[in-house]
Image (cartoon, rainbow, N blue to C red):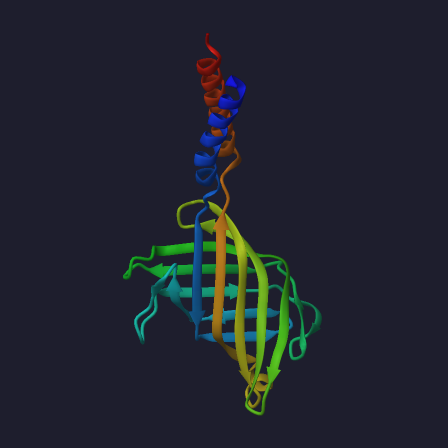
């Protein structure tokens, strides 16, 4: 009976602490507008505006900051029908202006990791719709390392794309989360073991 009580007490402690251990820093953001340059050397954005950050929404006609990204070169497929870009030499940078509660300065500074998918989604008489999707890794504004995914929906207009290879961001959505550092997990694990030992001694003491 005493062993059962000890086990239950330990499980209760772990149930309380585990959500704290698992908790991670997460940022969720969207971006729009700006110019996207498209070539076999890579895809890059200029002037895309940060529209939302963790529930904070930019006022009409304003932005919360900027989102800038660059891929590596095209490794397969076509820039017009869809393909795969390399992450070599890529970057993904989010900056905030800090006027609505979002961080001021660099919010996320990282790069793509692994292949970057470039998919033709739709083709109309006026424009082509593409999605750029990839995994990104980097550092958050609080110094924590984080990883996640971004999907950028990009429009190119048929009378423009093959002349100047430019488009615009219709909507970008990005979510990245940090993970607890190994050192932190080790300290918490040691603490749990110590607490378990103390509880057992207290319960089994005659």
Question: Quick one: 39 or 96, which is closer to the camera?
Answer: 96
> Going 58% across and 76% down the picture, which residue do you hit?
130
Q: In the rendering, at what x and y percent does residue 31 appear?
A: 43, 68
> What residue occupies the far right of the structure in this picture?
76
Question: Quick one: 166 or 134, which is closer to the camera?
Answer: 134
Question: Quick one: 187 or 116, which is closer to the camera?
Answer: 187
Lateral position of residue 87 relative to residue 196, left or right: right
> What residue occupies the far front of the structure in this picture?
1
Q: In the rendering, at what x and y percent does residue 107 appear?
A: 40, 55
> Going 53% across and 69% down the picture, which residue do you hit?
152
20 in relation to 44, above or below? above
82 in relation to 182, above or below? below
> Going 49% across and 62% down the picture, which residue do you hit?
174
> Going 52% across and 29% down the picture, which residue do you hit?
186
Q: In the rendering, at what x and y percent does residue 63 appear?
A: 34, 69
* Image quadrant where residue 131 sits: bottom right
> What residue occupies the far top of the structure in this picture?
206
Lateral position of residue 39 relative to residue 108, left or right: right
186 in relation to 146, above or below? above
Question: Quick one: 16 or 41, which is closer to the camera?
Answer: 16
Q: In the rendering, at what x and y percent does residue 169 appear?
A: 49, 75
> What residue occupies the far left of the structure in this picture?
99
Callout count? 0
Lateral position of residue 73 relative to residue 140, left or right: right
């Amino acid at each position: 009976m005493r062993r059962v009580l000890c086990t239950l007490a330990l499980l209760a402690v772990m149930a309380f602490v585990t959500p704290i251990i698992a908790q991670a820093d997460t940022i969720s953001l969207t971006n729009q507008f700006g110019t996207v340059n498209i070539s076999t050397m890579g895809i890059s954005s200029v002037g895309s505006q940060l529209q939302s950050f963790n529930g904070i929404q930019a006022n009409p006609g304003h932005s919360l900051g900027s989102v800038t990204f660059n891929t590596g070169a095209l490794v397969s497929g076509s820039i017009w029908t869809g393909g795969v870009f390399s992450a070599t030499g890529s970057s993904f940078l989010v900056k905030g202006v800090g006027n609505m509660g979002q961080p001021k300065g660099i919010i996320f500074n990282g790069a793509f990791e692994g292949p970057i998918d470039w998919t033709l989604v739709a083709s109309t008489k006026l424009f082509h719709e593409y999605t750029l999707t990839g995994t990104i890794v980097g550092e958050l504004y609080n110094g924590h390392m984080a990883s996640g995914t971004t999907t950028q929906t990009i429009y190119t207009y048929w009378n423009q794309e093959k002349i100047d290879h430019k488009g615009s961001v219709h909507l970008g959505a990005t979510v990245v989360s940090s993970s607890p550092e190994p050192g932190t997990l080790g300290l918490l694990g040691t603490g749990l073991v110590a607490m378990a030992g103390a509880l057992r001694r207290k319960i089994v003491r005659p």
